[in-house]
Amino acid sequence: MANKKTTPSHLEEILWKDAAPGGVIYEAGNAEKYKTGAWRSMKPIWNEEKCKHCMLCFPVCPDSSILVKDQKMTGIDYDHCKGCGVCVEVCPFKVFDYVVEE
């Protein structure tokens, strides 16, 4: 019986219910507390000259990273933008370039 897999003895004592949970948010609404922009692999770049300020991007941003003043978009909060690209997809005027994060 070649290649028989065995469990290391130190792992045999760990039960699934003792393992730390993953993917759990202990405090709801904590996105503002933590700068999560470093997680991005893609980055939306806003072109102010093309923007019609229709604000279709604002309500769909899951991280509230669309910056607004006087009912007009003023930029993107890159400290919290995770680069999901939803703003890029919903914009009818194609004001966002979606580029690889450097």
Image (tube, rainbow, N blue to C red):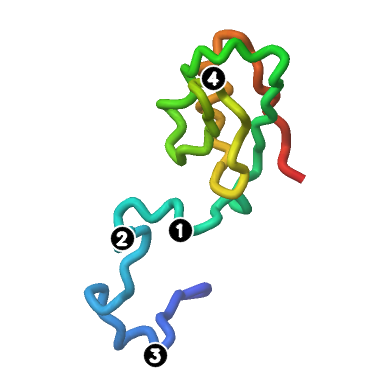
| Mark 4 and mark 2 residues within 8 Å of each other at the beta carbon | no
Front label number (1 vs 2):
1
Front label number (2 vs 3):
2
Q: CA distance from mark 1 to mark 3?
A: 40 Å
Farthest front residue in view: 70
Q: Is residue 14 above or below residue 32?
A: below
The label shown at residue 9 is 3
Mark 2 lies on residue: 27
| Mark 1 and mark 2 residues within 8 Å of each other at the beta carbon | yes
Mark 1 lies on residue: 33
Front label number (4 vs 1):
1
Drawn side of residue 46 relative to residue 65, left or right: right
Mark 4: few, some, or many residues within 10 Å (few <14, many ≥20)?
A: few
Front label number (4 vs 2):
2
| Mark 4 and mark 1 residues within 8 Å of each other at the beta carbon | no
Q: Amino acid at mark 2?
A: Glu
Mark 4 lies on residue: 89
- Nearer to me, 77 or 98: 77
The label shown at residue 43 is none
Q: CA distance from mark 1 to mark 2?
A: 10 Å
Q: Amino acid at mark 4?
A: Glu
Q: CA distance from mark 2 to mark 3?
A: 36 Å
Front label number (1 vs 3):
1
SS of the residue under disc 4: helix
Q: CA distance from mark 3 to mark 4?
A: 50 Å
Q: Identify the residue at horizontal 43%, vertical 86% (top origin).
A: 8
- Which of the two discs, 4 and 2, labels the residue nearer the N terminus? 2
Mark 2: few, some, or many residues within 10 Å (few <14, many ≥20)?
A: few
